[in-house]
Amino acid sequence: MNPLLLYRVISYGEKISGFRLIVYVFLGYTVARVTSPWFIIINLLGISGAFAAGDLLNDYYDWRLLGENNYVSGRINNHTKLFFYVFLPSIFSALSVFFLGRDGIIMVLIYIIPIIYSVPPIRLKKRPFFSIITPPLGVTLIFLQSTRGKFLEYKEILLLSILIFFYHIYIECIHIYEDLTHPDEEKIMDERGIKRLMVCVCICELVLSSIFSIKNPVFLAGTLSSGIRLTTIRKLSFENIRKVRRNPFGMYWGIFELGVYGLAGILGVFTGGL
């Protein structure tokens, strides 16, 4: 059993690693200027445990319910074995909540969300509205958890979390778009509906980031990024969506926006200067 594939630490085949989202952990550290080595390490281990457990559960139930061919298929064939392999990374999440105390409260939600997203009977990923907003909500919580509560002290960090939420609805739409090309995936929207939602989300982020820029000009990065993404949506197709989803540095993603926020965090823009 290869743990790198079992827990989707690395991407393989059609499966993309959930560990790419660790970028939001470090973005949280950066914008909030978190310097405690203890918090940085324990928080990272706890969130990594949630990633691993969540991706395993997702792959297991996609195989059992949809017949999807992935690394888990046939290797974990009963709930006893599933519980064992989910329990192992869950230890890190549980210990992080214990050691972080009040600073680890959001971690509980970060762990629960992948479970209710993938596991029946709730399985939010098959429900049209919740399947779209649940992953972005999880990403936003990962970011907020990694600020060590600084979002309560600095409003700009809270404003940034709102933009991250809308940004990731757009990214989730790319995911849903690609799922349309796979016959064994659950279809919750058609191509036209996905593109309409992407346009609406980009417009929302453009308007919000423009308003937020009145308080802090750094949010103009969101205005520029969402504007560029608006121009790329019409170019999306079944022929290029696989490549688009696997290239986060392309213009379709506009990930430079996060880079600007990270650099601004290093300079203390979100926390009152150097």
Image: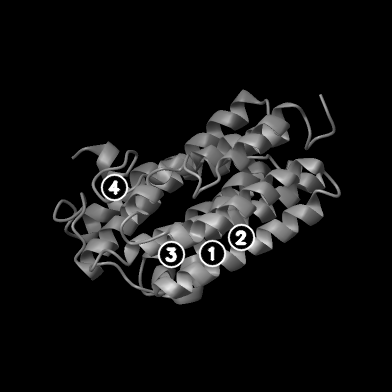
Q: Residues within 10 Å of mark 1 (few under 14, many from 20)?
A: many
Q: Secondary structure at mark 1?
A: helix
Residue 16 position (above or below residue 262): below
Q: Nearer the viewer, mark 4 or mark 2?
A: 2
- Tell which circle, 2 or 3, labels the residue nearer the N-terminal end: 3
* Closer to viewer: mark 3 or mark 1: 1
* Residue on which disc 1 sits: 198
Q: Which of the 4 quarters of the picture holds residue 197?
A: bottom right
Q: Is residue 145 visible?
A: yes
| Residue identified by numbered label 3 | 117
Q: Secondary structure at mark 3?
A: helix
What's the amino acid at mark 1? Met
Mark sitting on residue 202: 2
Separation of marks 3 and 4 at Cα, in angstroms:
18 Å
Task: Using the numbered discs, state the Cα–Cα distance from disc 1 to disc 2 in whole angstroms.
Answer: 6 Å
Looking at the picture, how far across and down is residue 90, in whole percent?
41, 46
User: Residue at point 77% right, 30% down?
Assistant: 268
* Image position of 48 (left or right of 65): right
